Image: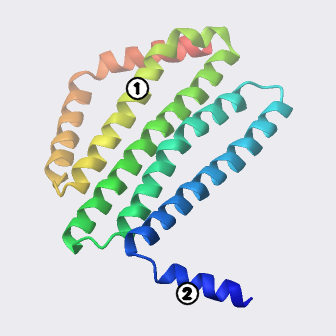
């Protein structure tokens, strides 16, 4: 016990950069262990089932966890440094924005995977696969753009107003065309 207390006191009196390096290595090791445990358990769970959807889900989560853990470790490292408050605030904002973008990207991948699984259940749905994937990509790209603009401090009130008025005008002008389009989609899905 006495040796542990001496060792702890010795660590605390190390140069700040050595202590920073030790904390950084501990963060990286913790992230690696977390990734190995979570993905390992999920892969075991996915092997027990007969469906391929869960294998795809585990694949998406496995590819998403690396950049998210990297950003988490980077945030921890930057917050351990004694940076000026403005620089720390900007770096935390950039990292938060990066986490949101990475999260939305992989949420888009996950949505596309589930959409593909739904389409594969019935062969008649294959005709709407490409338009549906395109709509999902556009929706998530628009959501990501809005989040980025909002975090940059750009007000979206004028954009929302313009989109609202414009969509009403387009919907009224193309009422018959849109009705026919959605009727056709419904007929294709319902056979």
- Of residue 175 and residue 152, the one placed in the foreground of this image is 152
Mark 2–mark 1 distance (CA, rounded to whole Å) = 59 Å
From the top left corner, tell me how far across and down residue 140 is, in percent.
39, 36
Crowd around label 1: few <14 · some 14–19 · many ≥20 (10 Å): few
Crowd around label 2: few <14 · some 14–19 · many ≥20 (10 Å): few
State the residue at coordinates (25%, 56%).
151
State the residue at coordinates (73%, 24%).
52
Q: How many marks?
A: 2
State the residue at coordinates (49%, 82%).
12
From the top left corner, tell me how far across and down residue 152 is, in percent.
20, 54
User: Which quarter of the picture shows residue 82?
Assistant: bottom left
User: Which quarter of the picture shows residue 101?
Assistant: top left
- Of residue 38 and residue 102, the one placed in the foreground of this image is 38
Dot 1 falls on a residue whose secondary structure is helix
State the residue at coordinates (46%, 12%).
184
User: Which quarter of the picture shows residue 7?
Assistant: bottom right
Callouts 2 and 1 close, C-beta under 8 Å = no
Quarter containing the C terminus: top right
* Label disc, if present, on residue 9 of the rendered structure: 2
* Label disc, if present, on residue 83 of the rendered structure: none
From the top left corner, tell me how far across and down residue 142 is, in percent.
31, 37
Dot 2 falls on a residue whose secondary structure is helix
- Of residue 163 and residue 93, the one placed in the foreground of this image is 93
Tag nearer the camera, 2 or 1: 2
Quarter containing the N terminus: bottom right
Which residue has dot 1 on it?
135
From the top left corner, tell me how far across and down residue 105 is, in percent.
43, 37
Q: Is residue 89 above or below residue 5?
A: above
- Of residue 35 and residue 139, the one placed in the foreground of this image is 35
């Amino acid at each position: 016990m006495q040796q542990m207390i001496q060792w702890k006191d010795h660590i605390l009196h190390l140069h700040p950069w050595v202590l920073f390096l030790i904390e950084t290595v501990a963060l990286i090791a913790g992230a690696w262990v977390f990734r190995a445990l979570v993905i390992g358990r999920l892969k075991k769970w996915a092997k027990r089932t007969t469906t391929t959807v869960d294998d795809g889900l585990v694949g998406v989560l496995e590819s998403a966890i690396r950049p998210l853990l990297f950003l988490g470790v980077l945030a921890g490292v930057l917050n351990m440094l004694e940076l000026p408050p403005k620089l720390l605030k900007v770096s935390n904002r950039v990292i938060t924005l990066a986490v949101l973008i990475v999260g939305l990207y992989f949420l888009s991948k996950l949505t596309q995977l589930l959409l593909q699984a739904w389409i594969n259940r019935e062969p008649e749905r294959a005709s709407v696969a490409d338009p549906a994937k395109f709509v999902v990509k556009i929706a998530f790209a628009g959501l990501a753009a809005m989040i980025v603009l909002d975090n940059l401090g750009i007000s979206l009130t004028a954009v929302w107003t313009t989109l609202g008025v414009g969509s009403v005008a387009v919907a009224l002008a193309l009422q018959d065309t849109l009705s026919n389009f959605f009727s056709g989609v419904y007929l294709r899905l319902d056979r």
